[in-house]
Amino acid sequence: MVVDPLIGPVPEGWDEFVRDQRLLPVWSSRLLRAADWCAQTASSMVLVRESGGGPPVAAFHTRHLGLGHPGRFVQPGRIPVASLTECRTAPATTEAGLAFARATGEPDRAEAVRVFERAIRARAGPGGRAIAYRNLLDRHLPVVPAAGRVKLRVTPRMVLTNQWPDLAGYLASLPGKWRSQLRKIRDTVRTDPSLRFAVAGTIDPAEAGWLAEVVRNRYASRAVPRPPLPAGYFAELGRLPGSRFLTYRDGRGRLVGYSALYDDGQELRLICWGSRGETDGRRGNLYFDQYLRLVELMVGTGRRRLILGPGMQRIKARYGARPEARWALVGLR
């Protein structure tokens, strides 16, 4: 079943599949639709079932570069054709856009990918034969067709594996110079009377969206403009079980920084970091302190791993995180 989330109903069984397979919150239909309202391109939600109407075995999310949403980005009278179908989660571009039922083996997963590629051709149009799979992990490579496609190594994601009984043990495992710096940062933030830290289940959506956009603009390429995440996205994120927000507030209660994270019961995953700008009360130490808070939460809850995502590799490596390879496959279907 192939659906444009702004036009058709969510594929039947989509959210049940997301829940049962413990997928990241970016797979929630409510988050996908919230983000899609501000997207520049059309997208597709694709659910693959067993033959004969059996249970879902795989879910895919794509965006169609060159294909706008009807009525918003397409001129009347023109038939748009996507120049490239990009398989990835949106708007969190650090995740692959394919997920499988845990009970399926490699042959079934490879067949699900073939079914997906056949189904997506009609959505992309006769000229949209090119496809790109972004942010694939090693486990994805055996099931995604590579013949005739270019394989590229992309920025790895940084992962920290839990092996400590407490935060003191973790800090003791770090190199001396960095351990000393982190302790100083932690003490500075913890003893600052003008700062308050909390772990919350919800956050003000407008504030969260604003602070996330401030950080994105600090590093984003001006040559590739991208709409911000809407406030509704963070409102929906706060409603999902497993979502948490590590918040920093000033003496007036104003949000000055936060981490959005997801806890699936086995792993903690950093979704995004938001903070105020230089002229709006930014606190430089908070970015570094958040990682210590995340490690402390991982150790305290006994979670197996902390996934910090790509980017800032040198900084994350100082916390003991190690790179996990990611790949892209690009070519014709």
Image (cartoon, rainbow, N blue to C red):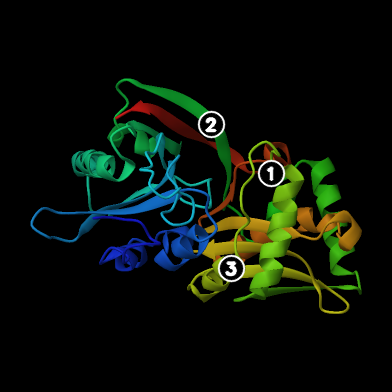
How crowded is the residue under tag 3: few (<14 C-alpha within 10 Å), some, or many (20+)?
many
Looking at the picture, how far across and down is residue 151, in whole percent? 42, 24
Q: Which residue is mark 3?
A: 234
For the point 22% across and 38% down, the residue is 114
Q: Which mark sits nearer the N-terminus, 1 or 3?
A: 3
Q: Which residue is mark 2?
A: 154
Residue type indicated by callout 2: Val
Q: Which mark sits nearer the N-terminus, 2 or 1?
A: 2
For the point 25% across and 66% down, the residue is 12
Q: Is residue 240 left or right of residue 197?
A: left
For the point 45% across and 32% down, the residue is 328
Looking at the picture, how far across and down is residue 178, in whole percent? 81, 44
Label 1 secondary element:
helix
Residue type indicated by callout 1: Lys
How crowded is the residue under tag 2: few (<14 C-alpha within 10 Å), some, or many (20+)?
some
Tell me where residue 150 sits by quadrant.
top left
How crowded is the residue under tag 1: few (<14 C-alpha within 10 Å), some, or many (20+)?
many
Q: Which mark sits nearer the N-terminus, 3 or 2?
A: 2
Residue type indicated by callout 3: Phe
* Mark 3–mark 2 distance (CA, rounded to whole Å): 27 Å
Looking at the picture, how far across and down is residue 2, in whole percent? 27, 53
Q: Which residue is mark 1?
A: 316
Q: Nearer the viewer, residue 201 or 117?
A: 117
The label on residue 289 is: none
Residue that protrudes farthest toward the top in the picture: 148
Tell me where residue 45 sits by quadrant.
bottom left
Q: Is residue 8 left or right of residue 294?
A: left
Looking at the picture, how far across and down is residue 333, in whole percent? 29, 30
Q: Is residue 315 left or right of residue 142?
A: right
